[in-house]
Image: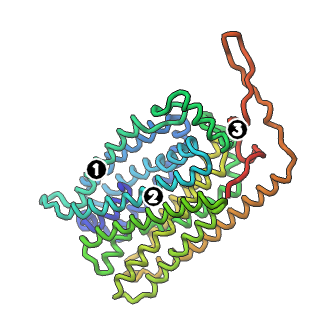
Amino acid sequence: MDKTTLGSAAILGIREATHLTTNQYNWLGTIFYLSYLVFEYPQNIALQRFPVGKWMSLNISVWAVALCAHAACKNFGGLFAVRLILGMCEGSITAGFMIVSSMFYTRTEQTLRVGYWFLMNGTAQIISGFISFGTLHIKTGSFEPWQWLMIITGILTLITAVAFWFLFPDSPTNSWFLTPAERVIAVQRIKENQTGVENKHFKKEQMIEALLDPKTWLFALFSALDNIPNSLTNQRQIIVTGFGFSPLQTTLLGCVDGVVEIVTIWTGVTIAARWKDSRAYVSVIYMVPNILGVFLINFLPWNDKVGLLFGIWLTGVGTTGFVLSLSWLSSVTAGHTKRITTNAIMLSAYCIGNSAGPFMWQAKYRPRNHIPWIIIGICYVCCMAIMLAIRRLLASENKRRDQEPPDDTYDDVYIEKVTEKGTVKVKVDKEFLDLTDIQNRDFRYVL
């Protein structure tokens, strides 16, 4: 919710109060993701070296302070600075969630769990819509509705940071809500992932492998292209107001975007979890409504504001594809260092797409914005093709491994353990050796 406050604040008066031009407003969206991009890899390294929950809590605390500081900004320079700080902190969130999801859940379960926490973006839009509606009714003279929005969401974020510090688990091995016996079970049950649990040692060879793995860059390309349209996050409210709706109506209509996101992500991840090897197909199917929405917005009469509004809502259906790509990447990447590297690359591509997107929305294209919508349509078509290409690549690799002779390279690995009777050698199962998906030839890619 607090990441989308800029879009909500746009119709609550922030542009007028801080004298923002169209390009300056676009830059506020871009600098957030450029900062996110610059700090993405350092954040991932920190997530590997420090307890995940505690590190995320610190970042959320800084985020909360920066969000509240928006209310004190009087010009573009001040907003630019606080947006930069927000982007720096954001780099820890999605990456941290993905790491914890892979430590607690099997590869099949990850599809649903990633979907569950991602669809809360939709819930956030609903809550934000009602808060925005409420702030428009606050009459406090010099303190404007957009400033109240920033303060309210900032306080909620600070409460969340405290909850993370005390309640969010760092890994199954020290989860406060599990007994010692349950912690052992939690680790054993993800043995089938063959991805390990957590490793605090950075392995250069795994990073190099991630950089040379073609699927890493296919996922990155998908992430970049799929998030150019995500610039709609900060433009949606402005566009809907342009259709002829009042600011009050627009704040409430924004709640529908949240409902669409919740329903589509929930149904999409549920289908993908139950229909074996269907991630790419489900992603492609859920992007078809986005293409339809682009056509409606481009070709419907400008006075058909209800039809145009439905076109906007349809363009939110394809979010399911990005959610599935997040869980899919986590499921097909083994080795802790390789996983944080691929996560960083994919989320860096996510930042590049989000950084480039805002500059499509130039004042000269208004009100129809044909050029931005055409670019968005092209991006969705390319994303559909990339998902199918990834599936074909992984299916071919599985087939190749099925034809290989058994690999016993890592079958007999022992570590020394000190006991009361002296030092003994203990065999370590291959699944817990922190091997990459390429090193472990028993690894099969889920499709």
- x, y percentage for residue 186? 57, 36
Element carrying mark 1: helix
Colour theme: rainbow
Secondary element type, mark 2: loop
Mark closest to the chain's N terminus, 1 or 2: 1
Q: Provide the secondary structure element on which disc 3 rests.
A: helix
- Mark 1 or mark 2, which is nearer to you? 2
Q: What amino acid does circle 2 point to?
A: Leu
Against 233, residue 196 (above or below) is: above
Q: Position of residue 130 (x, y in %)?
A: 27, 62
Query: Where the C terminus falls, by quadrant?
Result: bottom right
Q: Quadrant of residue 297?
A: bottom left
Which amino acid type corresponds to the residue marked 1 in the rendered image? Ala
Please say if 343 is above or below 142: above
| Pointer 3 or 2: first along the chain | 2
Apparent side of residue 143 relative to residue 402 in the rendered image (left or right): left
Identify the mark at residue 119; answer none if there is no mark.
2
Q: Is residue 323 left or right of residue 394?
A: left
Quarter of the image that includes the N terminus = bottom left
Residue located 74% across and 60% down the image: 395
1 and 2 marks in contact (CB < 8 Å): no
Residue at x-position 42% and y-position 67%: 260
Give how far apart the Cα atoms at labels 1 and 3 are.
47 Å
Q: Residue at x 34, y 68 (%)?
A: 254
Q: Which residue is mark 1?
A: 69
Judged left or right of residue 101, residue 244 is left
The residue closer to the viewer here, 31 or 181, is 181
C-alpha gap between disc 3 and disc 2: 31 Å
**Residue type marked 3:** Glu
Q: Nearer the viewer, mark 1 or mark 3?
A: 3
Asked whether the beta carbons under mark 1 and mark 3 sit within 8 Å of each other, the answer is no
Q: Which residue is mark 3?
A: 431
